[in-house]
Image: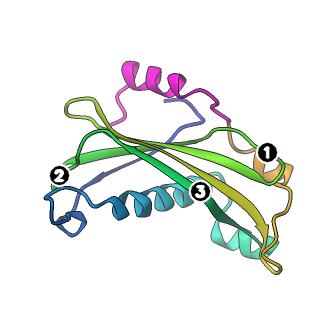
Amino acid sequence: MSAGLFSHTFTIPESAIDVNGHANNLEYLRWMQEVATAHSDAQGWTLDRYQATRTTWVIRSHSIEYLRPAFVGEEITLLTWIGGFEEQSSPRHYLFWRGRDRKILAKARTVWVFVDGDTGRARNIPEAFKSVFEVISEEKNVLQVLKTTSVD
């Protein structure tokens, strides 16, 4: 798998299911935030590091395209990657992928803004952060990885 991709595989729990019998939309948002945090941790930007640098990230926007439902007990792989860097913001992309039939369940994007932890104002993303994340600017590159590599 590409060094710029981060993946997390999990099983859909009963608690994630809504009245329609599939994974609730709010769960997708929670899973996106959790995998973004895990990716940051894996690259050395842990909660302790953010606290030490008195910085954090806030969300400017989310977009999610639901393509297929997810059901209780299904094993899902959530892939995430950084799509680029602006001065103070960065888009993060997500693919929810079901391995048993190799189907994409949802595609999502979040715009994260880097902020000063004391003032809450946007600030420039430091080079020390940018340098540890490989940017994947084209979703087609991730889709190619899915075609050629097992993420299980």
Which residue appears at 72% of the width and 45% of the height?
Answer: 132
79 to 33, vertically: above or below:
above
Which residue appears at 64% of the width and 71% of the height?
Answer: 47
Q: Residues within 10 Å of mark 1 (few under 14, many from 20)?
A: few
Under circle 3, the secondary element is strand
Q: Name the disc covering residue 71, or none.
A: 2
Gap between marks 3 and 2, in whole Å?
26 Å
Query: Which of the two marks, 1 or 3, is nearer to us in this view?
Result: 3
Asked whether the beta carbons under mark 1 and mark 3 sit within 8 Å of each other, the answer is: no
First of labels 1, 3 by sequence position: 3
Tag 2: amino acid: Phe
Which residue appears at 13% of the width and 58% of the height?
Answer: 21
Residue 90 in percent (x, y) is at 70, 48
Gap between marks 1 and 3, in whole Å?
15 Å
Query: Which of the two marks, 3 or 2, is nearer to us in this view?
Result: 3
What's drawn in magenta, residue-wise? 135-152
Under circle 2, the secondary element is loop
Residue 74 in percent (x, y) is at 19, 48
Residue 144 in percent (x, y) is at 46, 20
Under circle 1, the secondary element is loop
Q: Provide the residue designation for mark 1.
A: 86
Q: Provide the residue designation for mark 3.
A: 61
Q: Quadrant of residue 79?
A: top left
Tag 3: amino acid: Ser
